[in-house]
Amino acid sequence: MWLAGVFLLFGMAAGTCDVVMNSQALVLERRLGRSIIAGLHGMWCVGSLAAGGVGVLAAHLGIDARVHLAVVSVVLLGLGGLAGRGLLANQSSEGVPAPRRFALPSRAILAVGLVGFCGTFAEGASANWAAVYVTAVASAGPGVAAATYTVFMLCMAATRLIGDRFVRRMGADAVVRVGGIVAAAGGVLVVAGRTPWLCMAGFALVGVGVAVVVPLVFAAAGDVGDTPGEGIAGVATITYLSGLIAPAVTGWAAGALSYPAAFAMITAIVAVMTLLAGALRPRSRAGAEEGRRLERVAG
């Protein structure tokens, strides 16, 4: 029981840090005058892959999980403390009234959050079910099943690391729209494929297509709140909810219907995301501030 409490505290701390880190990324973006948030999220993928590798090594060496987690925690706390010293002040919040302790997301945040909900749903469902899918549908062995998940994550990491270049050239909404088309094509391949390699290729395309959705959603959210943190907190709540329910809903759909039917549903969700990508179109600073003023008056 105490372990559940520890994980609850860990999740609360991780969620808070997530909002702060994305807010800091937007502060840095504004100072540099160019998109960098996709690449920063790419480093999250790299960190996940590195953590998995360290875990595999620890298990191979027979290191007790408690010792492993304790050592990793101490190392990460130390590195986090050092990194925190270099955080930039958010000058955009100067002169802005203190945010309310609790507030429902505005219409603009809900629109951006819906795009994030769809992208996170496809990402979470694919990450959690890709290995199971190729095993159940394409009769893949354990090695190919594990490789499918790894390929999915590698495609996400690589796309995020180079994604900012496309954002600077095309704009966030266009990048998400093109990514949605790529992810939908991957979903069709997953649903129609019956061999491990076709399914793996489909999941790779899904990974490429949804990779930059979440970072660009956070970037757009930072422009629709009084401060970056306000918008990001609202959108993070929506995307976290999506990440929480996506694996379960996918499993229920697969059990009630079939695995291909479940991923046909996910492909439809990606199509909705593609249609809603215009919500990420940048708004002028003056227009954004006027919109927020009118919403506060209407509220």
Image (spheres, rainbow, N blue to C red):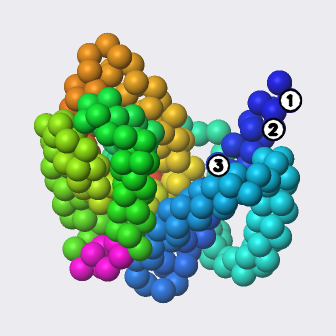
Q: Which residue is mark 1?
A: 2
Identified by mark 1, the residue type is: Trp
Majority secondary structure of the magenta segment? helix
The residue located at (22%, 25%) in the rendering is 261
**Taking the image as drawn, is residue 25 in sight?**
yes
Give the residues in magenta. Answer: 162-169
Could you say whether the residue bearing mark 1 is in a helix, strand or loop?
helix
Q: Residue at x 48, y 47 (%)?
A: 235
Kind of residue sitting beneath label 2: Val
Secondary structure, mark 3, is helix
Residue at mark 3 to residue at mark 1: CA–CA distance? 20 Å
Kindly identify which residue carries mark 3.
Answer: 15
Q: Are marks 1 and 2 in contact (CB under 8 Å)?
A: yes
**Membership of 52 in magenta stretch:** no
Answer few, some or many: residues within 10 Å of disc 2's Cα (few below 14, many 20 plus, some between 14 and 19).
few
Given the current orientation, which residue lies at the most extreme top position? 256
First of labels 3, 2 by sequence position? 2
Query: The N terminus appears in which quarter of the rendering?
Result: top right
* Left/right of residue 74 with respect to residue 221 in the rendered view: right
The answer to whether residue 23 is left or right of residue 105 is: right
- Residue 211 coordinates in the image, percent (x, y): 36, 59
Q: Considering only vertical position in the picture, is 91 above or below 52?
A: below
Q: Which residue is mark 2?
A: 6
Other-residue count near label 1 (Cα within 10 Å), few / some / many at <14 / 14–19 / ≥20:
few
Q: Residues under labels 1 and 2: Cα distance?
A: 6 Å
Q: Are marks 3 and 1 in contact (CB under 8 Å)?
A: no
